[in-house]
Image (tube, helix red, strand yellow):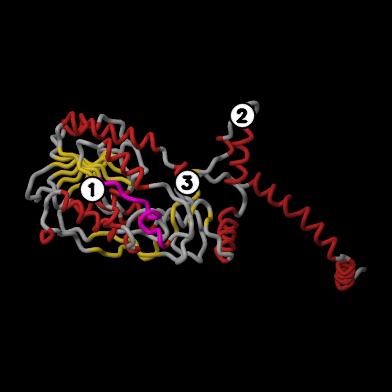
Amino acid sequence: MIMITDIFNRIFKRIKKINATQICIAVFIAFPLILFATEIIKPDRTISVNENRVLIAGKDINTGIFDGQFQRDLEKYLSDQFPLRDMLKGAEAGIRLRLGSGCIGGAYVGSDGRLFQKLLGSDVDIGRCVRYAARINRIAEQTGIETYVMYVPSAGISLKKNMPYGAPMYNYDALYSALRKELKSARMIDLRGALSGYEEYYYATDHHWTAAGAAAAYYEWCAAHGTEPDDRKCPTIISVNRNFRGTLWSRVPSELIHSEPLQAFEITEEVSVEADGKEISLYDYPALSTKDKYNFFEGGNHGILTVTNPNAENGKTLMILKDSFANSFLPCIVGDYAKIIMVDERYAFIDAGQLATDVGADEIAVIREIISVG
C-alpha cells in the first residue's frame, strides 16, 4: 500500500522538475482561458457606477456585419464587459498620475490634482449654440417677457492658472460674443469676472460649480435685477457630504484623487416642489449614499420642476430653461419668487414660449453652461 507521504513526495519531485519557462507558458495559456470562461459565465453588467453610464450588453450588439456596426458594437462590448474592468481602470489611472500625465480619459489633470473636462473647439457645436440663442431671442421678442441669460464658463476657462501648461480649450470669449449678437432682446449676465480665478467656485472632481460659485453668480443675478449690494442675500453654505467624487473622477478613478465636500445652501423657506407630476423634496438626501451625489439637488434632472413659495413677497413667477448647473443654483432664489418653473428641454418636449405665456411668467431665465444647448 502506497503511503500518503510517498504520494506527496512524488508530487513535490514533479513540481521541482517544472522550470520557470514552463510556469510562464502555463500562466500565459491559462489566464486568457480563465478570462474567456468568466466572460461566458458571468451576467452582463448594464451600468457602470464609477463611470455613471450605461454599458453595452450582449443583447445590444447590432447584427449588421456588412455595415461594420457589428464589429464596432462587439469592440465596445468586450471593452465594457471586460473582467475586473473597474479595478484595472483605477490601476491604469494611478500609474498615469504618478508618471505625471496631464490628460487621462478626457480629463485634464491640473498641477494641484484638480480635474478639468477636456473641451476643445471641435467639441463645441457653435452653430447649434447660436441657433439655440436665436430661439431664446425669438421667445423674448414674441412673449415680451423680461428674459435673462446667464451662461456659466467651464472650469477650465475660469481657472486657467490651474490647467496643465498649454492645455487647449475652446474659445469662450469668441463663443460668448457670437451668442451676445443673437440675444438682442435678452439681458446677458456676464459671469467671467465673477468666477475667474477662484478655485473654491468649482469642484476639483466634477465639472459643476460649488455652492460658493452659485452664490457668486447670484450676486451678479441680483445686480442685473437692480438690487443694491446691501440687499444681496444668499442662504448659508453648508457641507452635506464630505466624500464627494464627481463626474471627472469617474474618468480618473484613482484613490490618488481625494474626495471633497459637497456644498449646498441652508434652506429656511417653506416651499413645495413638484417634478414631472410627482411631489419631491428640494434636497434628496438618499442620493448622498449613491455614487452620483450631485443628484442631491432636486433628485437630479427632470423635464418640468415647479417650486411654490407661498411666503414670497413679490408674488412673481420665473421660468428657467436650464441644464444641471441650475440645479444647485435654484436654492439661491427660492425665496425671491412665488413660483419657479424649471424646464430641462432635454427631457421635456414643449414650446417654451407658449409655456411661459400659459403660466403667466413674469421673467424667463436661461441658466446653463455656455456649451450646453437644449
36 left or right of 369? right
Q: Is mark 3 on a helix, strand or loop?
A: strand
Looking at the image, which residue is at 31% across and 63% down? 240
Quarter of the image for residue 112 reads bottom left
Residue identifier under label 2: 63
Q: Tell me, for residue 53, which label it has, or none.
A: 3
Q: Is residue 152 magenta?
A: yes
Residue identifier under label 1: 189
Q: In which quarter of the image is the N terminus?
A: bottom right
Q: What element carries label 2?
A: loop
Looking at the image, which residue is at 21% across and 63% down? 236
Q: Which amino acid does label 1 sit on?
A: Ile
Quarter of the image for residue 343 reads top left
Q: Estimate how packed mark 3 is, as few (under 14), some (14 to 19) or many (20 or more) residues with alpha carbons within 10 Å.
A: few
Looking at the image, which residue is at 7% across and 50% down? 313
Residue most toward the right? 1
Q: What residue type is labelled 2?
A: Thr
